Image: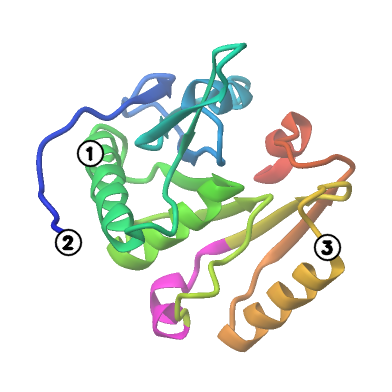
Amino acid sequence: MNEHHIKFERTAHYYTLGEPNKEAKQFWLVCHGYGQLASRIIKKFNQLPNAFILAPEGFSRFYWSEKDSLVGASWMTRKDRLSEIEDYCNYISQLYNSYKEQLADDVQINILGFSQGGATVVRWMERMQPDFDNLILWGAGFPPDLEYKPLHNYLENKKLWVVQGKTDHYLTEERLAKHEQFMKSQGLDCEEVWFDGGHEIDRAILNDLLG
């Protein structure tokens, strides 16, 4: 049995909120978590003033429950992961670039990844090095399979945030300690924010995060 790969054109799915024009003060690129949909996560951002929000959706959709017809999406699995990473990085870049050119040159660019979407946006940034002002990893962390020291010049003068819910069931003391040690070893300077909640985006914290 021989394994092969083939490139072909396909249709991707994404949502936006607001208008991509020169009056927008903020540009948010938001990537959902495992099993979510872009249409759901983007609703968390509908109270941000003067903002344009772009929410791409992962290629791989599946039924959470066939009985209830609940559909979710995923960015990647460990199977053929490098090809999947390359594909979604190209996809996100195409979306990002097409909308960024419609916005003002001084628009504030905020990139937010929730849960699995956190690793997604970091891998995209590591490969493509897009312009941004704030990176927010919500219920997520920096993927430990990447080397961040070569990115120090790129990350200079940029704000990095890690936001966690105090009752997030995915967090353990061991995971937190490992991630903290990894960030220190890589020289990653992050602002940590904790809130009373679980594995979710809290609207009040989101609205207050960047003042």
User: Looking at this view, is 20 or 4 the one in front?
Assistant: 4
Q: Position of residue 77 (x, y in %)?
A: 44, 52
Give the magenta part as a residue range: 149-159
Q: Which residue is mark 1?
A: 101
- Circle on res. 172: 3
Q: Which residue is mark 2?
A: 1
**Is residue 60 found left or right of 37 in the rendered image?**
left
- Circle on res. 192: none
Q: Position of residue 170 (x, y in %)?
A: 76, 52
Q: Position of residue 163 (x, y in %)?
A: 72, 52
Q: Are marks 1 and 3 in contact (CB under 8 Å)?
A: no
**Is residue 93 found left or right of 142 in the rendered image?**
left
Q: Position of residue 91 (x, y in %)?
A: 26, 43
User: Looking at this view, is 59 or 115 the one in front?
Assistant: 59
Say which amino acid is labelled 2.
Met
Q: Give the mark toward the camera: 1 or 3.
A: 3
Quick one: label 1 or label 2, which is nearer the N terminus? 2
Question: Residue drawn at (55%, 17%), measured in percent from left and top?
Answer: 66
Measure the alpha-carbon separation of dots 1 and 2: 46 Å
Q: Visible in this render: residue 49? A: no
For the residue carrying disc 3, how many other residues have a C-alpha within 10 Å: few (<14), some (14-19), or many (20+)? few
